[in-house]
Image: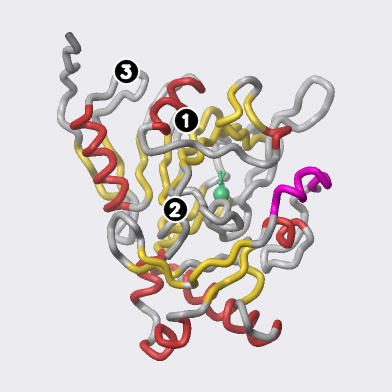
Amino acid sequence: MNVPIATPPLTVRPLSPVMGAEAIGVDLSRPLDEATFQAIHRAFLDASVLVLRDQRLTPEQHVAFSKRFGPLSIHVKDEFLYPGIPEILILSNRKHPDGRPMGFEDAGRYWHTDMSYVEEPPLGSLLHAVEIPPVGGDTIFCNMYLAYDALPDAMKARIASLRGVHSFVASFEGKTKAGASRGTLTDEQKKKLTDAVHPMVRTHPETGRKALYVNPGFTYKVEGMGEAEGLALLEELFAHSTQDRFLYRHVWQPHDLVFWDNRCAMHHATTYEPRYIRHMQRTTVKGDRPV
Ligand code: OGA
Ligand code: MN
């Protein structure tokens, strides 16, 4: 018989008035009962960014916990996947002994939501801080529900049925606002990538709330709109979304596991001094086509 393992009740503590919460009292290296899992899921939906501190997880445990939320996606930059565990993407400035980078070194240093350039972008990403610098390398998050809610009614009406075009290739080629310096893509990798077209306002499939869904990292034009007019509109929305009043800045502690909701939050990595190591591992949970 399967005996459920009793876990102490979960405490959820907000991290800012804008978004973000910390779930206290869970050890994800141990079996997780369904009630605690449900409480974590609820806290994630409420906060959009859920922080679980001091999680000393093996890559296998990281993958197993992530899979409770749905199937995982595998990143196209296959040279940065964890050896033997392709569900884990490495973000790191560590090098292999032969000098090759182990992971994305300066990943995400621009406002974006993960992989919005695919038809069914991931619902969320779980980033595990394996090694962090003593200072720097924070991650800033932006609440896209609040950004949408705060738009003037005229703008809400203007974008209600517009769709944005998202591309990973364009981001490498410097066509998005974030610009270049993301390394290169092989022809093989490019072949797997096409543009994705998504509504600029999406309704979150689990909370039912509306969120703005365009990002400077990957959205480079507006469907059916001239280039200049589309860019002007996007720029206006980007500037609006990233105002201080919509932001939470996460200062990492070693072994934080941060689970963000890509459907209603953007994020932005910050720099750190290259003499320090920053080694992070990410899983990415598949999501639905935005509607
Ligand atoms: C990511 C990402 C930001 C960071 O993992 O998707 O953008 O601060 N990371 O490492
Ligand atoms: Mn990212």
Q: Which residue is mark 2?
A: 288
Q: Foreground mark, 2 or 1?
A: 2
- Tally the numbered discs: 3
Q: Which residue is mark 3?
A: 30
Left or right of residue 30, residue 171 in this image:
right
Query: Mark 1 or mark 3: which comes first in sequence?
Result: 3
What percent of the width, then of the height, locates residue 206? 30, 54
Left or right of residue 180, residue 284 in this image:
left
What percent of the width, then of the height, locates residue 109? 63, 53
Query: Mark 2 or mark 1: which comes first in sequence?
Result: 1
- At 55% from the left and 81% from the top, the residue drawn is 236
- Residue type at numbered disc 1: Pro
- Asked whether residue 189 is drawn in magenta, I would say yes
The part of the chain drawn in magenta is: 185-193
Q: Is residue 250 visible?
A: no
Circle 2: is it few (<14), some (14-19), or many (20+) Cα within 10 Å?
few
- At 58% from the left and 77% from the top, the residue drawn is 234
Query: Mark 2 or mark 3: which comes first in sequence?
Result: 3
Q: Which mark is residue 254?
A: 1
**Mark 3 within 8 Å of ligand 1, using the beta carbon:** no
- Mark 2 to mark 1: distance in Å? 32 Å
Circle 1: is it few (<14), some (14-19), or many (20+) Cα within 10 Å?
some
For the residue pair 117 and 90, the one nearer the viewer reads as: 117
Q: Is residue 230 visible?
A: yes
- Residue type at numbered disc 2: Asp
Q: Foreground mark, 1 or 3?
A: 3
Quadrant assignment, res 97: top right
Is 237 drawn above or below residue 283 in the view shown? below
